[in-house]
Image (cartoon, coloured by chain):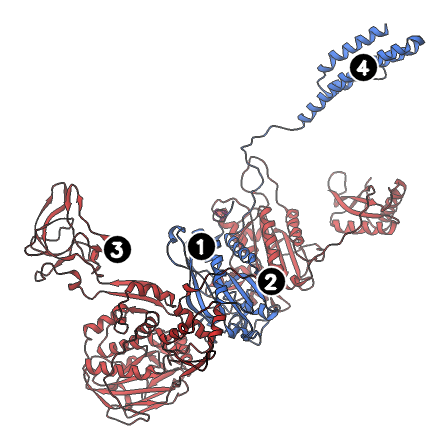
Chain colours: A blue, B red
Amino acid sequence: MIEETLDALVIEVQEMSPKLGSRVEFDSFKSTISGPKGKLTDVMKLMGKVPKEEKPIMGKKINEAKQLIQASMDEANKRIEDSELLSSLGPTIDPTLPSSNDAKGVLHPIAQVRDQVVELFQRIGFAVAEGTEIETEYYCFDALNIPKDHPARDMQDSYFMPDATKMANVSKESDEKYLLRTHTSSVQIRTLLKEKPPIRIVAPGRCFRRDTPDATHSANFHQIEGLYVDKKVTLTDLKATLDYFVKMVFGESAKTRLRPSFFPFTEPSFEMDFYSPDLGKLSNQWLEIMGCGMVDPEVFKSVGLDPNEYSGYAFGMGIERIAMILQGVDDIRYYYQNDIRFLRQFSD
Amino acid sequence: MKISYNWLKQYFKSEISSDAILTALPLIGFDVEETEVLGPPQMEHVVVGEVVEFEAHPNADRLRLCKVKTAEDETEHSIICGAKNFKAGDRVMVALPGAILPGNFKIKKSKLRGIESEGMLCSAKELNIGQDHDGIMILDSSVALGTELNAIYSDSDIIFHLEVTPNRVDVLSHIGLARELVARFGGSVEMPKIQSNIPIVDAFESNSVLKSLTVEASDNCPEYSAICIEGIKIGPSPDWLKKSLESVGLRSINNIVDITNYVLHETGQPLHAFDSAKVSGQSLTIRYAVNGEEVVTLDEKKHTLNDSMLVIADASKPLAIAGVMGSADGEVDKSTQSIILESAYFNPSSVRKTARTLNISTDSSYRFERGIDPQGVQLGMERACDLILDIAGGSLVGKRVQIGSVDKALKTIEFSPDALRSFIGFSVEDAEVQSIFESLNFKVEKASDLKWLITLPTYRKDVSRPVDLYEEFIRIFGTDKIPTQPISANGINAIDHPIYQFNDSVGAYMIGKSFNEAFLYTLRNEEEVAFFKGEDHAETSDLKLDNPLQSDQSHLRNSLIPGLLDVLELNLARQNLTSQFFERGRVFRVIKGQLVELISVGFISLGKSLDRKWQDGVEFDFYTAKSCAEDIFRLLPFKIKEREWSPIEASEFWQAEHSAKAGNLSKDGYEVSLGLLNIKNIKERWGLSNPIFAGSLLLQKELFEKEMKHFRYKVLSNQPASMKDLSLVVDKTVFANEVLETVKGFIAQSIEGFACESVEVFDVYEGEGLEAGKKSFAVSMKFRAQDRTLKDKEVNAVFEAVQSLVLKETNYQIRK
């Protein structure tokens, strides 16, 4: 009797459990079997009336039936759990639709070129120095051996602040005027006054010249200044460094030349030109890329270094110019319009 | 400066080709900006021919098939031509196969519409003789058949437009450049022969032309010499002279003026000729102008002078602005019969100042400003006298007067070849160094192997130190011969400046947050600065440049935000719907009456992107801006005081109650403002009516001198935490921070033996269920002990103590 009931119960569970479609169905079915008034529970209650000698056999039977029921129920439970998990997933995706998040932003093309140049110099031992955009005539000119009546010092060529201007965080040498720095070379002086050689710095920054804006002139522009001062720095070192730089930026096929020139703060002074077969419209012609030279003894004197003990080289380049050559941009003003379509051209 | 190749060859007699010169010039320091070919270059197989007869091309209406002979007894060439401006019997220029025309245009036999053409009939333009390209050139019938083109047009020339650096005034002449080419290529400079032997006196002797000559301003006119020439005949210059001047871009005026200009471009010495009949009182004085004195210069412009300017004046008026330009009052013209010729040395700074002030730059002033060769004063005078007597006739009156004498002493520099070698970093023979110096006309005297004495010519005032000699050596030696060596990078890199490190991380962070970087002008419009600050604000006046060039670039920027709004405006106007931009840059503020340059980061974002998307994106609000700003502070390489945020109340720039600020530039070294921009003003000035959120961080650069961050380990508890939530109803005007601080204070009073890790607001509610004017903050507290699991009892005790403190000491209500 018990046996029959058990067998029927196992068959019922084995038949019903695969048909259970939801957690609710599962739970209610489960209570009809193993709940307090469930069929299995009822069978178990009959155990008490089973004669003692039959108990072991009957116990075994019940256990077998329980295991079979449990297995079916576990299977149903697992199946329902899996389907519950899947149903929490939401609709399927369209892999071709874009994300609604904005794409990552872009760095400005001038910043990208600046960073690229800075990194190339960092690799060969240069560290970044910072200066201020407002400078004084002394640090921008006098200490760099630029004579008082040099054209760059004229009101026509550089932006000056009024005589009455007082600045809290840019120091003066004496009572010279403040101006917007015309080049990053002023960082050379501030650094040489503050630190002891060996000094190996690059100083990127914004500069100003009083030019009427056109395709190649902008009221402000950016330069990177380089300076290496130590004992026994030679002209050959200068050439090695700049050759490395040009080849890294413009490719191994680029040729360089040092064209003698004149700057008050270097002697000898050169313009570095390069020549590349792979530059589109600018291929196969010498292009001026930067000014450079050996630090003039007058500069060493103005920062209290003995020119017989120390030597060094310095170079300075316009970042916009390099960017324009590299990126093929023919009007500097595009860089300051910031049309996002333009900015994005140099990323991704 | 323009240099004529033909003219140059008079002093640099050499087989060196113009191409070789052209290649060499930049490498010895004279960049060639442009070359201009005047007249036809040397061409072979371009000869005079005669069109014997012609007929229409059988296969092309517009072409003619011509029979052309280039010698009387020669077979005729069959040439196809497109021009129609010739007739049978005309003499023309024929380019035969093998000819190479300008532009590397090679002529060879070729078929045109099925018929072979054995050459080309040329237009003036094709031969670089003129601009005429309407038809072929028709020559005079007297020109013999077969004459080579270059035999008819022999005056071709190449003009080099040279860039001469300001230190090399000695090269601003044909002789000057010839000296450099001799140094580079060898040979010697062929100087013009001086014929006249003019006696010099150092005091003025009165003569029939000039009664007195006085130098009052000897401080700026150390040497002045003059000579009188009478009986000259003014007229046009001979062709060679005209052509020379025209080749370097000068207009021929008359023989006397042309000669002075010629000598300037030949020797570099500026000269001036006065018509002696126009010199009132027959006297010349070199003096300072009187303030307000007026002069009409030769270019018919009126100038008002001041007392720092040197003039050459007669008894009543200035006749020239010394070293700059003559006055129309002393001009040599058709009627001139006698002249006073001036050759002088004016001090560079004086001429430069005068020319700059008057905004005149002439060939003379350009050279005086840079310092002419002291020896050139005499050479120029003598050379001009020779040419005048030769070309314009006349005779010298009296002697040449020279008042004062500019220093002509030769300079000697001590030089060590070893020092040179260690400076350049490679080895070079003594003999080579010596020969380079000698090629430059530097005298080498060896006191010993280690010490040489180098004596310089007077025209090389730019060379005064050993390092200048190193430059001269390397310039002539050739920079292309500097050996290639590996980079020497000894020692350890220094650390990048923290400002750079900071900006670098800000860039990476901001683009990760979908902001696009803009670069904007530092110089802004006054109106923009005043728009927010008011015209009377000290900042509006203190940010103004002394000498702006354009009215829209007159002020230093005090914020990055206006520029970013310009960018947003431009992009939206172009239907670029990108809504987030940032900039890293310097801005300027006035703090306690002093201008300060600050490190700044600015960003803006539309609250809601205008770019329609298939899914809704996340909106940008005050709190997004705040998290950006807080994150940027976290990027600082040093520790900085926790921001204390307070609302911005009234501002033209920010929207009150929707924006906040923290920090104080003079007290904390930083200031940050962020939130919604003033919607009314933004709409008025930029026409942007969508809500725009922005953030502006200003940092004193001195902050970056702080000590770098370093972090220390603190022992952590592994025990479980216990949480308690408390909901407090407060006045709407109360800020979260006040509630949190209050609760933290009460916890501190109540807790013992364990810690409260955090107190945070996790919900803010107002509306239904609450009184008007009230809101509620749900605050969660997290407790943990170092050494044990907390018991409910002890946590509840603290929680209850806090609640009773709230009820006792605040007017907050506890929401159950």
The three-letter code of the residue at mark 1 reads: Met
The three-letter code of the residue at mark 3 reads: Gly
Q: CA distance from mark 4 to mark 1?
A: 82 Å
Q: Residue at x 64, y 55 (%)?
A: B673
Mark 2 is surrounded, within 10 Å at the Cα level, by few (under 14), some (14 to 19) or many (20 or more) other residues, namely few
The three-letter code of the residue at mark 4 reads: Thr
Image depth: mark 4 or mark 2 in front: 2
Tell me if I can see residue B536 in this picture.
yes
Q: Which residue is mark 4?
A: A32
Instruction: Identify the chain of the residue marked 3, using the numbered disc in the image.
Output: B
- Which element type, helix, strand or loop, lies under badge 3? loop
Q: Which residue is mark 1?
A: A324
Mark 1 is surrounded, within 10 Å at the Cα level, by few (under 14), some (14 to 19) or many (20 or more) other residues, namely some
Q: CA distance from mark 4 to mark 2?
A: 84 Å
- Which element type, helix, strand or loop, lies under badge 1? helix
Whether callout 1 and callout 3 share a subunit is answered no
Q: Which residue is mark 3?
A: B103
Image depth: mark 4 or mark 1 in front: 1
Q: Give me the disc on residue B491.
A: 2
- Which element type, helix, strand or loop, lies under badge 2? loop
Tell me if I can see residue A131 in this picture.
no
The three-letter code of the residue at mark 2 reads: Gly
Instruction: Identify the chain of the residue marked 1, using the numbered disc in the image.
Output: A
Using residue B555 as the reference point, say whether residue B89 is left or right of it.
Answer: left
Instruction: Identify the chain of the residue marked 2, using the numbered disc in the image.
Output: B
